[in-house]
Image (cartoon, rainbow, N blue to C red):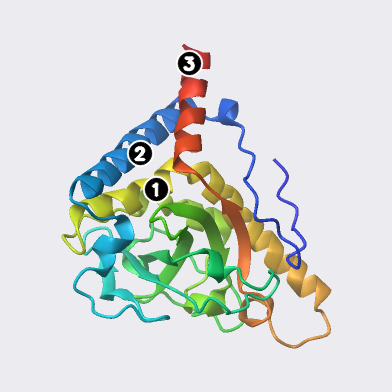
Amino acid sequence: MDFAAPDVSALPDAAMEIDFQALSDTRLAEMETAAMAVGDSLAELSAQGTTLVGDVLKGQGEFLQWDHYPAGDVYDRTSHAQYYYHAHPADNRTPGYPDGLWATEHGHFHTFLRAEGMPPGAVSAALPGNQTGETADALSHIVAISMGRDGLPMRLFTTNRWVTGEQWHDAETVIGLIDRFTVTSPVPSRPVNSWITHMLRLFRPQIEVLLRRRDAALVDWQTRHADTETPAHEDRGLEVTSLTVIDIADQVERLAAERARRA
């Protein structure tokens, strides 16, 4: 698969091609298990007469742009996974993308792992301004999940370091965090936390590609802006570093097709 840096001034909002035949039997089985959990969560919320976003926002008062929901974020003290939901103004222009990118979504989840949950020996990237040592509450961003106004996920995307103020790690390190992201806390609810936990596993192939494209995009940005003193990771001109549309039903259908092919 080609991970060459895309032209961030014209990244396509298009489905990513994943070679399901290249997935190991173990990975395929993990994704199938995740698909069942995702489906169960959606069915449970539907039976309760609510949606993922509705459950996250319940009892939170007026929904305000930029604020984190639930208030104080969701944090799992066992895995040290963390996430929150928020929204950008509809007319907020994302550098490198067409006007109105955020107008097509309701909001998005940002997923993280704190330093305490990092694998032994993980070292943050040697970048200007990056912390030289890990602190317990330092965050590493994994991926963001964009939600449509129908309450279903519509995109996955990665962001530049300045967006979340994270402790930056290279793509391969962050890929290693996906299976460590597990949320079992009761807030906002068990089905929401199960859903977001298993979404990262169901779409792991796409997330791996996005993270590698994220790193490539930053290298490309730095090369094309060599005349500025601002490091690529802190350049406000680069916000979203990689993106793809997703569809749960399509992902499940492709998993089933691949399982049938191997049978």
Q: Are marks 3 and 1 in contact (CB under 8 Å)?
A: no
Taking the image as shown, residue 155 lies to the left or right of residue 77, namely: right
Vertical placement of residue 103 versus 132, above or below? above
User: How dense is the environment of label 2, judged by Cα within 10 Å: few (below 14), some, or many (20 and up)?
Assistant: many
Q: Residue at x 29, y 73 (%)?
A: 73
Taking the image as shown, residue 137 lies to the left or right of residue 124, namely: left
Dot 2 or dot 1: first in sequence order is 2
Name the quadrant of the N terminus: top right
Q: Are marks 2 and 1 in contact (CB under 8 Å)?
A: yes
Amino acid under disc 2: Ala
Marks 3/1: CA distance?
22 Å
- Which residue has dot 3 on it? 260
Marks 2/3: CA distance?
18 Å
Q: Position of residue 156 (x, y in %)?
A: 52, 56
- Which residue has dot 1 on it? 199
Taking the image as shown, residue 133 lies to the left or right of residue 181, namely: right
- Which residue has dot 2 on it? 34
Residue 160 quadrant: bottom right
Marks 2/1: CA distance?
7 Å
Q: As rendered, which of 243 and 60 lies closer to the eye? A: 60
Q: As rendered, which of 64 and 142 lies closer to the eye? A: 64
Q: Position of residue 172 (x, y in %)?
A: 55, 53
Vertical placement of residue 228 versus 247, above or below? below
Amino acid under disc 1: Met
The local secondary structure at tag 2 comes to helix
Residue 16 quadrant: top right
Dot 2 or dot 3: first in sequence order is 2
Dot 3 or dot 1: first in sequence order is 1
Taking the image as shown, residue 63 lies to the left or right of residue 27, namely: left
Q: Are marks 2 and 3 in contact (CB under 8 Å)?
A: no
Amino acid under disc 3: Ala
Vertical placement of residue 26 versus 118, above or below? above
